Every structure is written in C-alpha cells, then in structure tokens.
Image: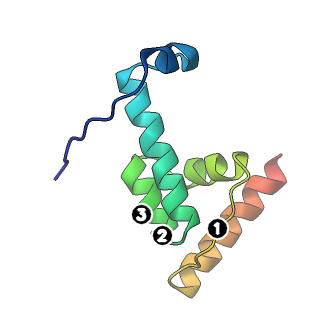
Amino acid sequence: MVEKITIKLPVDLLELTGLNSKNLEEKSLLIWILDIYAEGKITLSKAANLLNIKVDKFLSEFHRRHLKHIGGPESAEEAQKEYDLVQKLTNDD
C-alpha cells in the first residue's frame, strides 16, 4: 500500500535545484532509502527492491555518496554477495 503525503517546499528551492514534483519524489525516496540502509534498518536487497533497481546500481549510488553502513548482513551468504559486489565495483574503477 502506498500512502501519499504532502510536503510544503518553497518554490524557489525547487527552481534552484531544477527539480519538479516527479523527480523530487524519486530523489527523496532514493535519499531516504540510502539513509535507512546506512542505519542498518533494511537489507541491501530490500533497499534495491524498494527503488526497483539492481543491487549493484544501489551500491554504486551508496558508495558514490561516501555513505557508511552501520548494520550488517543477515546471513553469511548475503555478506559474501555484498563483499563480492564491492570487490567487483572497486576493481572496475
């Protein structure tokens, strides 16, 4: 279920950022999910699923913003997948 909320923002703030209501919603959701993932409240796969993107794309965005993850993986398999993906992403640069 999706619940709509209304947030009042100054118009000049939207003009300054070049955002409109559609991409503001997308960016807000991205930032919020990056934050709750960093706090360890959701798993990597859940974060990517909520944004409807692949895990590697989510991790790239997370690391591009120099965020730090507080929580840990829920299983050894998840830890290994995250480790392998981070290794791949850092070796591709």
Q: Nearer the viewer, mark 1 or mark 3?
A: 1
Q: Residue 93: where, in percent of width, then height? A: 83, 46
Viewer-proximal residue among 74 and 65: 65
Q: Circle 1 is placed at which residue position?
A: 69
Marks 2/3 in contact by CB < 8 Å: the verdict is yes
Determine the CA span between mark 1 and mark 2: 10 Å
- Relative vertical location of residue 15 with respect to residue 70 in this rendering, above or below: above
| Residue 46 circle label | 3
Question: Disc 2 residue type?
Answer: Thr
Residue beneath the point at 68% across and 56% down: 67
> Looking at the image, is mark 1 or mark 2 earlier in the sequence?
2
| Residue 43 circle label | 2
Q: Nearer the viewer, mark 1 or mark 2?
A: 1
Determine the CA span between mark 2 and mark 3: 5 Å
Dot 3 surroundings within 10 Å: few (below 14), some, or many (20 or more)?
some
Question: Disc 1 residue type?
Answer: His
> For numbered disc 3, what is the local secondary structure?
helix
